[in-house]
Structures are given as C-alpha cells and as structure tokens.
Image (cartoon, helix red, strand yellow):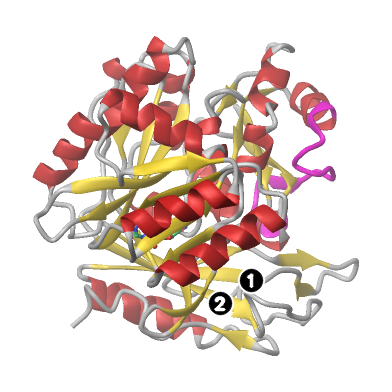
Amino acid sequence: MNVLVVGSGGREHTLAWKLLQSPNVENVFCVPGNGGTALLPHCQNLPATEEDFSKIGQYAKEKAVAFVIVGPELPLAKGIRDFLEQQNIPVFGPTETGAQIEASKWWAKALMQDVGIPTAVGETFTDAETAKAYVTQQGAPIVVKADGLAAGKGVTVAETVESAHTAIEGLFAADTEQVVVEECLVGEEVSVLALTDGITVRPLLPAQDHKRIGEGDTGGNTGGMGAYAPAPLLSAERLAQVTETILQPTVDALRDRAIDYQGVLYAGLIVTPEGDSKVLEFNCRFGDPETQAILPLLETPLDEVIMACLEKRLHELPPLKWSSQKALCVVAASQGYPGSYEKGKEITGTTQDWDAFVFHAGTRLDAEGHLLTSGGRVLGVTGLGDDFDQAAEKAYSAIAQIKFSGCYYRSDIGYRVRS
Ligand code: AMP
Ligand code: GLY
C-alpha cells in the first residue's frame, strides 16, 4: 500500500520511517515533508502546505494511498478529515469537532468535568475583571491558559496573584476570547498517547518529554527538547488505571456526543505525589518528540494498527508488540530557539551509519542536494539500549558528530532515569 503523511517535523519523519518498515507499505508521500523524508528510500516529498486540503486530496488520489495520516493539530482542527472523507479518502485523525479536545481548552475542560475525568479544577472567563476576581478569591499558585491553539505558549503557571492578573490582562489585550483559570497541579508530567477507533483505546508506551530549553528543565517553553520511553513513572498497573479512568471514559464521552473520534488521543498527565494521574491537557495527534522515542520500540506494523482503527476493529487486534529496550531522543535546535534564529546552515554527519536513528525536523535539501537547517528544532537523534544509560550514550555519541553552525542540544535529556 501507499500512505500519505501530512506534516514536516521529526514526528512525521518518524511516522514515514516506521510505516516503511512494514512489509505492507510500498511508498510513503509526505506533504510537505523535510530533508529527512526527502532522503528516506521509498519516500517522496510533495509540495503543498499542510492546510492545502484540496491539493492533499488530489495527491492522495493520484498516488492511490490507502490512508492519510495527519501529524500536526492545525489541519485536524481545520477539518482535514471531514474534507478528505467527503472524497472517500480515509484519514487517521479526528474530525474538526473531535479536534476541539486540543483546539479548545474550555471545551476539553467542560467535557472532563461533565464526565468526571480527573483534572485540575478550573473555570472559563470571557472578561478580565471576572477572571481576576476569581484568581484573587482562589489565591496563588494558579494557572492561566488561553483558549485555542497556542503551540504551548498560551500557558502561565503564576506563582503570585499579581502575575496571574498580568497574564489575564495580557491575554485579553491580545484579543483572546476565552481564558481558562485553573488549579495548579503538582507532580511529574508524563504523556500517554493512545490509538483509538472511536470505541476501543490502545495506549502506547508512556513517554516523558523535556519542554524547557535549558538544562535542568529551566528557561522558556519549546516544542520539546528530548523525550524517552517507556517512562517508568507509569507502571503497567498505573497505565491500566489511566486507560480505565481517563482514556476509555473520554472516548466513550466523545462517542456519546456523536463524535467519531478516531486517531490519537494524547493525554498530557501529571502524576501527583500520591500516585494519582490527572489530565493537564489533551492533544488530538502524536506528540513531538515523544513519537521519536515511542515508535522505534513498536514491533507491530504501524499500518496494521492504523487500518484496524480506520475499520473500527481495534478490539480484534492482538496486544501491541513492543521491544523490551529503552529509547531516548535528543533534539538539536538552532541557536536562539525558541526565540529568533537563523536558517540555512549546512548540516553534516547525518547520513553516517550511526548506531542511532536520526529523525529530521527543520531541515531541507537545496537544489544541489545540500542539507540545510530550516527551523528551530532541526533534528532528533534516538538511541536504543538495554537501559536508559545505554540509550543516552548512543544518542549522544551520534549527535556529537552531527554538525551545523549554532547547533544546540541539552546534555541532560532523561536525567530522571539515567544514573
Ligand atoms: P498545556 O499547554 O496545557 O500542556 O500546558 C503547558 C505546560 O504548562 C504543561 O506542560 C505544564 O508544565 C504546565 N501546566 C499546564 N496546566 C497546569 C496545571 N494545571 N498545573 C500545573 N502546571 C500546568
Ligand atoms: N511534546 C509535546 C507535544 O507534542 O505537544
């Protein structure tokens, strides 16, 4: 079969690579893809933006793809599945309505509160004065979030009432229509990505990512500077609990609301010191860079799981097969990221035979075949090992040999699980 992948990051390179490992998958087409997907055998980039649904539909038909898999949230929130399904093109990912679970924090919060999914207590506001009064009444620390997609930048964890007030004023001044104010949860964060056909859920191995730019998880928020799986924070027993108390009731609630939620349900959880898991946020897609750590461990062919979701027979699928190894992914970014940075730096060393996987993110090939940086997060290197020390050693020895001007990466990815 042929498959079309929408997106251009490390997550999409990983999806394309994983799909091509399956004996059933002949060719993968990426719209628009990156330098890594351009270099991957049996993979081809096709030019169009990820929001050009008609072009994507045209490519899907021309290339006779079995399905389209969507990496980023924006096309999902804009209804790519609804659009392509009208042309009988199967899409792995939720409908526009279902994608609100990520695209609207108040919608997600209302759903969770209705069903009793464990999450931070919170309220939604449409004006600054009422929101500020609520903050004054609740006290700090408290969390202020913009409704809508903000690429991780719309959240303030305020240590004082004053800083929460400032954040609220800033959001409304920037024309945010709704602001969610919620209880500040304390604990360690973990991501559980589950695949679902809208009825059954199958969690993947839990992963942890490092969102901050600086060592020791300090500094500004980024898309993610590294990740590792399986996160020991969630034992098999706790993961089963997450499925029972969070993932399954959420999918059931979506179905009760006549939403055909098929695709990835990604729960960003906080595990409290008491061991309870609570939802910080839901995403409607694969995580980046969690995918770069999780998928190399998956032994069941990915297309088989996706086809089972598309055909609503996930309950028939045998348990997913996983490698017993550990995976750790380190992201190399352009100097200056997550602020402003330069592009167009030549990258060398990616094509050598490393004992690690090099997943491209912000890279492109120029007309002469040079590999150049083209984004903030440039690439991620995933090492596998019998333990996290070995996985880290493999990822770090490879990334140290990959060069571009202004290359920055954290040296402490996985510090919680390394000795
Ligand atoms: P979100 O975009 O909702 O995932 O928020 C981004 C980050 O803000 C999360 O990864 C957490 O580190 C932090 N955060 C969000 N909500 C809360 C909360 N209720 N309590 C504590 N930290 C939070
Ligand atoms: N790594 C966080 C995310 O994909 O949202």
Task: Please provide percent x and percent y for residue 403.
Answer: 63, 86
Mark nearer the N terminus (1 vs 2): 2
Q: Badge 1 local density, few (<14 within 10 Å), some, or many (20+)?
A: many
Q: Residue 378, labelled with which disc?
A: 1
Local secondary structure at mark 1: strand
- Pointer 1 and pointer 2: residues touching (CB < 8 Å)? yes
Q: Which residue is mark 2?
A: 332
Is residue 191 inside the magenta stretch? Answer: no
Describe residue 224's horizontal placement relative to residue 127 as left or right: left
Residues in magenta, as a range? 38-54
Residue 227 numbered mark, or none: none
Q: Quadrant of residue 251?
A: top left
State yes or no: residue 39 in magenta: yes
Residue at screen point 31% across, 42% down: 204
Please tell me which residue lies in front, 234 or 136: 136
**Outermost residue, right side:** 367
Type of the residue with mark 1: Val
Q: Secondary structure at mark 2?
A: strand
Depth order, front residue of 178/73: 178
Q: Point out the image quarter for the C terminus.
A: bottom left
Marks 1 and 2, Cα distance to the nearest angstrom? 6 Å
Residue occupying image coordinates x 33% and y 66%? 141
